[in-house]
Amino acid sequence: MREEPRGVRARPVEIATALAYAVLGGLAMFDSARIGFGWGFDGPQSGTFPYWVGGILMLASGAVLASAALRRTRAIFATRAQLASVARVFVPASVYVAAMHVLGLYVASAALLAWFMSRLGGYPWVVSIASGLATAAVVFVVFELWFLVSLPKGPLEDLLGY
Amino acid sequence: MENLAALAAGFAVALTPSNLALMLIGVLLGVVIGVLPGLGGANGIAILLPLTFAMEPVSAVIMLSCIYWGALFGGAITSILFNIPGEPWSVATTFDGYPMAQRGRAAEALVAAFTSSFFGAFVAIVVITAIAPLVARFALRFGPPEFFAVMFLSFAAFVGQGRGSAWKTLAAMMAGFLLACFGLDTVTGALRLTFGSTELMRGFDFLVAVIGLFGISEVLIAIEEGLTFQGAKARIDPRVVLRVWQELPRYSMIALRSSVIGCWMGVTPAGATPASFMSYGMARKLSKQGAAFGTGRIEGVIAPEVANNAAGVSALLPMLALGVPGSPTAAVLLSGLIMWGLQPGPMLFVEQKDFVWGLIASMYLGNVAAFLVVLTLVPLFAAILRIPFAIIAPLILIACAIGAYTINSAMFDVVLMLVFGLVGYVMKKLDYPLAPMVLALVLGNRTEQAFRQSLLLSDGSLAVFFRGWLSSTIMTAGVLLLFLPLIGRASAVLRARLA
């Protein structure tokens, strides 16, 4: 007997996703009903198209939901180890996006690269931080100076006069 | 003849030194993008699109389309050398390409893959040159019902020809249409599905969705699989090239068949990925040595590679002639057209001759360039994969964030990108197809517009779509394609019962 890997099963995720789609479809129908999905004095009302699209979405996700609910399977969505690796990328990425709002893109990008290199790549801190700063500098030259595209900036750039 | 004259004029546009340089840059970038898991044609081009605002439209489209050709070629490199498809459409190439590499025949497999890719692309470009102007001229007669019928046909083809669950394809597609509905309704000025949020008033930007769905989610999938790159040597000896080329004419039937499959799947937006699988399956079924497929048969590399490049290139045919893209990458190029101030659709061939024919001419040149680049620089591209993922992953994340931000200079889009990344990850894991969602998102507004205008013509009767012979033919074809899987299943059941 092969030992079953521990993790999240596919069935609940399948059901939850189908439910999420159904809710989206339902919301669309609800909101379309609010603005009208019939025949206005100037043609089809704003809600017509999303109303029916939402309806088809509910139908399709209902079918997916039914087949997922009826099929008894022990298939795995992702093992714990897999989810842990995904989190190792996704959590820093979320922090990165949040930090971008406060610190600007350059500082956040430098920090992101340094974090990945030292925590996941096992590089020494000095090398990682230097690489992060170098990346930010390259991005700055390419975007702000060559292409004249302004990227989000934070307090550090203010301090430096940009 | 008229086409050839127009093509010659197109070459005059494409052959300027600056455009040639852009072509080369595009191809090089494209191969790198194709090699890296996490960066693909669609999101690679989406990230770079905002940088082309200030460029001449024809130069911009030449560079961006060359990225696409490069990515189509590059996907095969990692499939063969590392058993890791750099692009979804090169998954089928791993089946026989990697076993060949394991037996020390990597160079042969690579030469066969590149040559096949070039062949497929070339056939598709010839098809575009010959047919696209005709389709466009024909489409000038289209009214709203016909346009809606064409959209219906395209989306029905997804459901009918998709490989997974038809319901999931339908759900993904409808979700895409709904995402397109968010925000201001441009016809009546009503706010739809915003639920009071001002951020949602702008609606969902298609490019942001592409970067999240294809870029971020790819990185998550790649890290989950715990990538370790241990691959074969990648040097290509000129003698091997000649030997493989001598051998290849034997497989011309497979190549021709695969290019037909590829062109068909590319024009109907089923896309390059199913085309490569279908062509591989056909080659295996029709071969006398079918059982030996998967152990390193060269036909198993030729068939998918011809088909995926033919499909990838011919996806531009409906994009140019009708304004209906045949693949996510073509859809990104389409939103580029809008960004550069061009109106996609059949009028493009009338009003923007230089642009269209310059692009078509550059397709010939770009594919030759891509072919030569991959053939000579393979070791360099393979070396990119030896860079540890701990460096590649954050760089891709940063590129995606910059790309998502620069589209509208909106921070909210970067957050959305991350959300789309997570959605894309879950969808991929559960086998929901992403391409129909993305195409529905980009075509949603125009589909709805065609739908509304048609209904206005008929005072609200749905019969309008079956009234004219043209729209009724297209609609009927669409309905047939939609129920293709049902018909196939029913006939299989029937045959099983008779046997």
Image: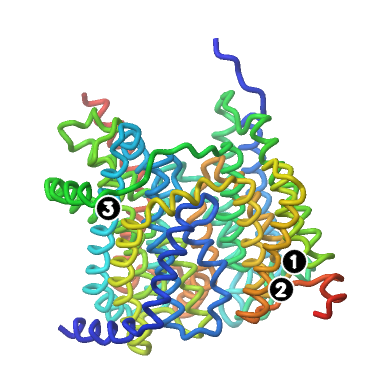
Residue sitting at x 47%, y 49%? B383
Residue B232 in the image: above or below residue B211: above
Residue A10: % across, % down: 61, 32
Instruction: Say whether residue B357 is left or right of residue A146.
Output: left
Give, as a three-letter code, the residue at label 1. Tyr
Locate the N terminus of chain B by quadrant: bottom left
Give, as a three-letter code, the residue at label 3. Val
What residue did someone put label 1 on? A106
Element marked by disc 3? helix
Element marked by disc 1? helix
What residue did someone put label 2 on? A151
CB atoms of marks 1 and 2 within 8 Å: yes
Residue sitting at x 67%, y 62%? A135
Q: Report, in whole angstroms, how far the alpha carbon at label 2 lies from the one at label 3.
A: 41 Å
Residue B306 image label: 3
Q: Nearer the viewer, mark 1 or mark 3?
A: 1
Residue A35 in the image: above or below residue B391: below
Earlier residue among tags 1 and 2: 1
Locate the C terminus of chain B by quadrant: top left
Q: Residues within 10 Å of mark 1 (few under 14, many from 20)?
A: many
Q: Residues within 10 Å of mark 2 (few under 14, many from 20)?
A: some
Same chain, labels 2 and 3 = no
Residue B61: % across, % down: 43, 76
- Give the residue at the far top of this rendering: A1
Instruction: Say whether residue B338 is left or right of residue B79.
Output: right
Answer whether residue B228 is visible to the viewer in this image: yes
CB atoms of marks 2 and 3 within 8 Å: no
